[in-house]
Amino acid sequence: MPIELIVSPIMKPVVRAKSILFSPHRRSSRYVPIIKELPEDNISQYAVLKRFGSGSKTFDVYDTNKGENPTGPENPGSSVFWFTRSRAVKGAYRMYSRSIRGTGPNEEDEPVAAVKAGLRGNVLLIRAPEGAAAELGWHVINHRVDAIDSYRIFTLANGNTYQWTFRGQWLEQVHNLGEKESEVRERIGQVTSNGTSGFTLKVDESKIPREMALSTALCSVIDQWNTNLEVGGIYYPRQKGNVRWKRD
């Protein structure tokens, strides 16, 4: 049985309390950072779609060739990555790459990353075929809030800070974090929902490895954008019939 089901009665009031604690901070920290919009050139686009017949257990990742094939190629086996949900932990997935196959002791596929969404979300990058070796290891996803929005925030080995926003579902590279009006938020990616089928990710791969962009986006889809409280979607998910803009 997933541990989240056991601790859910405890975590629901914790999630609501954390959401309430965010409110006064929002009212007392209003400022306007500099925002650089996502450019239209040199942007990769990936479709992350539920595999037919798997429910939410497996998501396939397709390269849409910069939007020419919005739902990926005709061959369903031509995905570049896929995510498989853990049986033991809710909100946990393993990420596999089509370019790394049969590397296990018994020629089984080995993951390139392990993803865990939730109040203590993280990404363990195990191997990145096209990324820097320095990025291998743990990347903790923290929570941040200000008067503008709430965020999932993480840092890479190059020292750069990134955040996923609740409103607009932007991936931003943040410079001068917390420095009020001198803070610069450079938008380098965005997620758009494909309904119940999955989501589409646009990302500037010159700013962040695609493995990290895809993994952290999945965390936000599962948890950050799956609740009206903007935190704890695994424990306090949006109920059917709720309007997205409605606040609890």
Image (cartoon, rainbow, N blue to C red):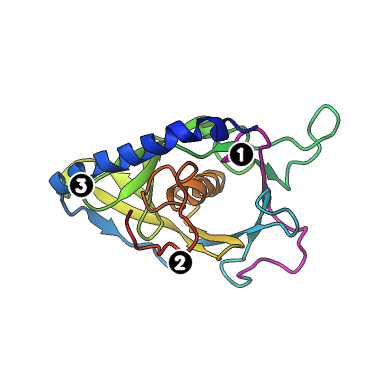
For the residues labelled 2 and 3, the Cα–Cα distance comes to 34 Å
Q: Position of residue 70 (x, y in %)?
A: 60, 70
Q: Residue 207 lies in magenta, yes or no?
A: no
Mark found first going from the N terminus, 2 or 3: 3
- The type of residue carrying mark 1 is Ala
| Mark closer to the observer (1, 3) | 3
For label 2, the SS is loop
Circle 1 crowding by C-alpha within 10 Å: few under 14, some 14–19, many from 20: some
Residue holding disc 2: 41
For label 1, the SS is loop
Which of the two residues, 232 or 45, is positioned nearer the viewer here? 232
- Residue 26's disc is 3
The residue located at (19%, 42%) in the rendering is 25
Examine the rendering and report whether any part of residue 121 can be seen.
Answer: no
Q: Which residues are magenta?
A: 70-93
- Residue 98's disc is none
- The type of residue carrying mark 2 is Asp
Q: Position of residue 61 (x, y in %)?
A: 64, 55
Circle 3 crowding by C-alpha within 10 Å: few under 14, some 14–19, many from 20: some
The residue located at (73%, 46%) in the rendering is 99
Q: Residue furthest right?
A: 106
- Left-right relation of 17 to 193: left
Residue holding disc 1: 128
Mark found first going from the N terminus, 1 or 2: 2
| Mark closer to the observer (2, 3) | 3
Which of the two residues, 164 or 128, is positioned nearer the viewer here? 164
